[in-house]
Image (spheres, rainbow, N blue to C red):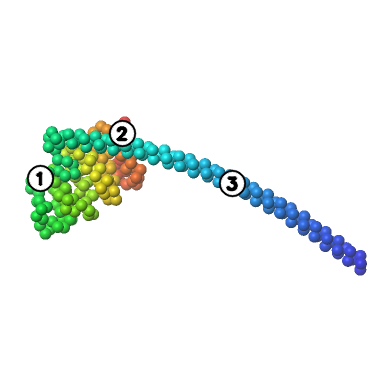
């Protein structure tokens, strides 16, 4: 009986030590795995930090190019305004944003009851534009904006002022009128069209650099639109 107890005791002790060794081995393996995982995590964080730095540098460089491009466009617009200003002194050309009233257009100082409706006034001006009476339509759209400066039709009216100038061959005035669309109505639905037409207008003037800048802006800001497709076609014609 004592021998049996000793045997059992030896077996229990052996099992205990075997368990201890097994646990120790597993613990070492666990810590090794944890150490490797921690090293992998640190490497991943370091790699991510490098990528973030590269992205920030690229973003800063992109902002620099955008600022430089915008400066080029702004300088050209300034030169156009100066040129138009000198023409006004010599030839009495009206300023783009407020051309002189044309004959045959009802003065807004005594509007009829129907003229108080912005949609009616806008449609009347647009009808004149469609008839090809571009100077008169510009006057009508300007009067509309004086009467209704902030409506759902206001950005459209400013756009058609630019389009009227463009169809008259007054390309510089058209550029400034399209610029007013983007500055005065930045959330309006005519901004993509105004930018496109502004780029085309610079192209007509032979200013390929600014044309390229603005047409590319249309593609970047409104990539999946008909305006972007038209801008791509216009860019293909630039050398």
Q: Quadrant of the C terminus?
A: top left
Give the alpha-carbon distance from disc 1 to disc 2, as whole Å. 36 Å
User: Farthest top residue?
Assistant: 239
Question: Badge 3, how many Cα within 10 Å: few under 14, some, many 20+?
Answer: few
Residue 147, label in figure: none
Give how far across and how far down residue 80 sits, in percent.
22, 35
Are the residues at dot 1 and dot 2 in contact (C-beta closer than 8 Å)? Answer: no
- The residue indicated by pointer 3 is 42
Give how far across and how far down residue 226 sits, in percent.
30, 45
**Lateral position of residue 88 relative to residue 47, left or right:** left
Camera-side residue: 178 or 67? Answer: 67
Give the mark nearer the N terminus: 3 vs 1.
Answer: 3
- The residue indicated by pointer 1 is 102
Give how far across and how far down residue 197 sits, in percent.
25, 41
1 up-or-down from 119: above or below? below
The answer to whether one can see residue 21 in this image is: yes
Q: Residue at x 14, y 35 (%)?
A: 89
User: Farthest right residue?
Assistant: 2
Numbered disc 2: secondary structure: helix
Camera-side residue: 44 or 3? Answer: 44
- The residue indicated by pointer 2 is 209
Numbered disc 3: secondary structure: helix
79 up-or-down from 135: above or below? above
113 up-or-down from 189: above or below? below
Q: Quadrant of the N terminus?
A: bottom right
**Lateral position of residue 238 relative to residue 22, left or right:** left
């Amino acid at each position: 009986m004592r021998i049996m107890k000793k045997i059992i005791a030896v077996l229990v002790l052996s099992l205990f030590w075997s368990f201890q060794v097994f646990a120790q081995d597993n613990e070492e393996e666990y810590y090794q795995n944890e150490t490797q995982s921690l090293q992998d995590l640190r490497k991943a964080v370091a790699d991510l930090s490098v990528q973030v730095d590269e992205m920030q540098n690229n973003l800063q460089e992109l902002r620099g190019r955008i600022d430089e491009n915008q400066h080029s466009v702004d300088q050209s617009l300034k030169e156009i305004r100066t040129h138009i200003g000198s023409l006004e002194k010599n030839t009495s050309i009206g300023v783009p944003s407020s051309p002189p009233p044309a004959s045959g257009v009802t003065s807004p100082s005594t509007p009829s009851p129907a003229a108080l409706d912005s949609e009616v006034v806008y449609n009347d001006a647009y009808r004149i534009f469609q008839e090809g009476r571009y100077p008169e339509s510009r006057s009508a759209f300007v009067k509309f904006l004086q009467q209704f400066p902030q409506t759902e039709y206001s950005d459209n009216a400013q756009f058609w002022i630019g389009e009227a100038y463009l169809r008259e061959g007054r390309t510089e005035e058209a550029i400034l009128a399209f610029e007013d669309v983007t500055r005065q109505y930045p959330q309006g639905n005519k901004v993509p069209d105004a930018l496109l037409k502004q780029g085309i207008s610079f192209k007509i003037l032979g200013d390929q650099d600014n044309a390229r800048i603005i047409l590319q802006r249309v593609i970047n800001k409104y990539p999946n639109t008909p305006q972007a497709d038209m801008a791509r076609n216009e860019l293909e014609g630039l050398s």
